[in-house]
Image (cartoon, helix red, strand yellow):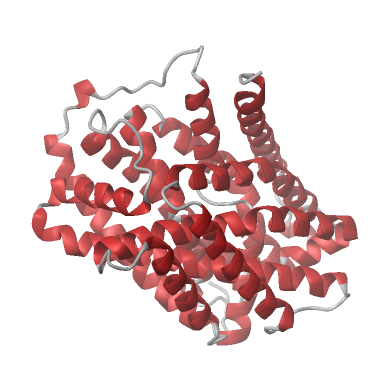
């Protein structure tokens, strides 16, 4: 280890915050739905999505550590068109993404605390809580909060799976997906599952911004080795947890639920029932706290990530570099919270529709982000020794092809099969 390499415990942070962003709707909702509806059949799809998308996500910490700037600076170097494209893609998804994670968190809060407050009331409370936490302006607050929540959920999930294995009847749970011709609903769900697995692809930009923020806030050097190690721990952890949620959905819920509940409160209760059937009734409050904390941390992370990215993009368009919160961040934060709250009110009792809309939009924009990231990491400003190898570039290209196939699958199922 070189003299400027920080110890592991200091280097960890941005990757865990990123993991907290990822481990939310894609895991608690979509992965559980995959297991409940298809058994173990979509486990390979979840693994493939994580594997194919890895290079595009890893570009964030790789670029930040190699150049000392965020991916947004890399986009600007490709041309202002790249920044405008980033802004358009971000604005097209941010409101539904924040609304979806807040809606699920509101259901968890209602099941944990009281259902006397309506779901839209809880969503408002949670968004205000997130905005208040972010008003502190320090990355360390976000980092510590997310780390604690991830540890709590990981321990409870691993324990649930370990206790569920002995009672699981593997012979009754399918291992292969429905063979063609697949129904439209199957294809739409598959595209939505992949679209947000493990997270939205624009979070690669967030990771690069969080890494630089940690360096400024805490004085921890952002080196290529520490950045990759931090990211890999978070990324591999999210992939493993996604598979565990598929397993829980299959072992506990397969054949017992016809479809996902329409309300977020009903879904929260169904999810907690799945855990307690493995761990026992004594674990109900612990699981509720873990699930709610996870969704709250995701709500906080996405509520910060979108305004932070918009602020950085606007600064780059002005030829500046954002190193602190500006009016763009605060206006974006307020607007994001207000519109997300309006969507939560509009979609009351329509959790499945809101989640599928958010994940599908994310999947449709993912190929563009992946292409931008590949162009950026191959830029002249990246030192030759820090650029990806030919094999890595090939893996990145394979990921782009995979993302286009999934986006095409969604569009075909939505419009081609409906015509």
Image quadrant where one finds the C terminus: top right
Q: Give x and y (percent) for residue 373.
A: 73, 52
Residue 160's place in the image compared with 324, above or below, is: above
210 and 129: which is toward the camera: 129
Q: Tell me: 96 left or right of 165.
A: right
> Does the rendering let one see residue 353?
yes
- Is residue 247 found left or right of 4 in the rendered image? left
Question: Measured along the vertical axis of the image, is residue 247 above or below residue 202?
Answer: above
Please state which of residues 3 and 72 is positioned toward the viewer in this rendering: 72
Q: In the rendering, at what x and y percent does residue 252 appear?
A: 21, 38
Q: Is 340 situated left or right of 121 in this image?
A: right
Please tell me which residue is depicted at 35% across the width and 68% down the height of the picture.
149
For residue 342, what is the image quadrant? Answer: bottom right
Residue at 69 percent of width and 77 percent of height: 331
Q: Is residue 372 placed above or below 46 in the rendered structure?
A: below
Q: How many marks?
A: 0
Q: Position of residue 75 (x, y in %)?
A: 81, 60
Q: Residue 18 location, x and y as percent? A: 52, 63
Q: Residue at coordinates 50% horizontally, 73% vertically from top-left?
A: 11
> In the rendered image, which quarter is residue 233 located in?
bottom left
Q: Residue at x 67, y 72 (%)?
A: 332
Q: Can residue 10 be seen in the rendering of this structure?
A: no
């Amino acid at each position: 280890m070189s003299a400027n390499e920080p110890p592991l415990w200091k280097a960890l942070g941005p990757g865990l915050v990123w993991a907290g962003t990822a481990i939310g709707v894609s895991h608690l909702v979509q992965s559980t739905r995959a297991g409940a509806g298809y058994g173990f059949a979509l486990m390979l799809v979840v693994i493939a999505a994580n594997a194919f998308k890895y290079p595009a996500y890893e570009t964030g910490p790789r670029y930040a550590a190699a150049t000392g700037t965020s991916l947004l600076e890399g986009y600007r170097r490709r041309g202002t068109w790249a920044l405008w494209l980033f802004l358009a893609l971000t604005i097209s998804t941010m409101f539904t993404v924040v609304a979806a994670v807040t809606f699920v968190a509101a259901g968890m809060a209602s099941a944990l605390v009281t259902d006397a407050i309506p779901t839209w009331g809880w969503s408002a409370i949670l968004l205000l809580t997130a905005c208040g936490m972010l008003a502190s302006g320090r990355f360390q607050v976000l980092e510590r909060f997310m780390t604690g929540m991830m540890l709590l959920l990981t321990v409870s999930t691993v324990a649930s799976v370990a206790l569920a294995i002995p009672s699981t009847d593997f012979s009754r749970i399918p291992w292969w997906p429905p063979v063609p011709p697949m129904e439209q609903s199957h294809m739409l769900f598959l595209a939505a599952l992949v679209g947000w697995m493990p997270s939205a692809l624009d979070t690669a930009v967030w990771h690069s911004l969080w890494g630089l923020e940690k360096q400024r806030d805490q004085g921890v050097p952002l080196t290529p080795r520490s950045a990759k190690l931090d990211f890999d721990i978070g990324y591999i952890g999210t992939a493993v947890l996604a598979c565990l949620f598929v397993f829980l959905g299959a072992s506990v819920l397969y054949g017992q639920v016809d479809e996902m509940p329409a309300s977020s409160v009903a879904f929260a209760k169904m999810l907690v029932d799945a855990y307690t059937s493995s761990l026992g009734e004594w674990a109900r409050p612990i699981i509720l706290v873990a699930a709610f904390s996870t969704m709250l941390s995701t709500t906080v992370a996405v509520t910060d990530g979108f305004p932070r990215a918009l602020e950085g993009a606007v600064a780059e368009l002005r030829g500046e570099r954002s190193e602190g919160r500006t009016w763009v961040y605060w206006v974006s934060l307020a607007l994001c919270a207000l519109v997300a709250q309006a969507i939560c009110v509009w979609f009351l009792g329509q959790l499945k529709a809101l989640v599928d809309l958010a994940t599908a939009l994310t999947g449709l924009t993912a190929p563009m982000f992946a292409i931008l990231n590949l162009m950026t990491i191959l830029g002249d400003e990246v030192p030759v020794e820090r650029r990806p190898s030919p094999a890595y570039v090939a893996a990145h290209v394979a990921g782009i092809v995979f993302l286009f196939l999934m986006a095409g699958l969604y569009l075909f199922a939505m419009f081609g099969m409906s015509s």
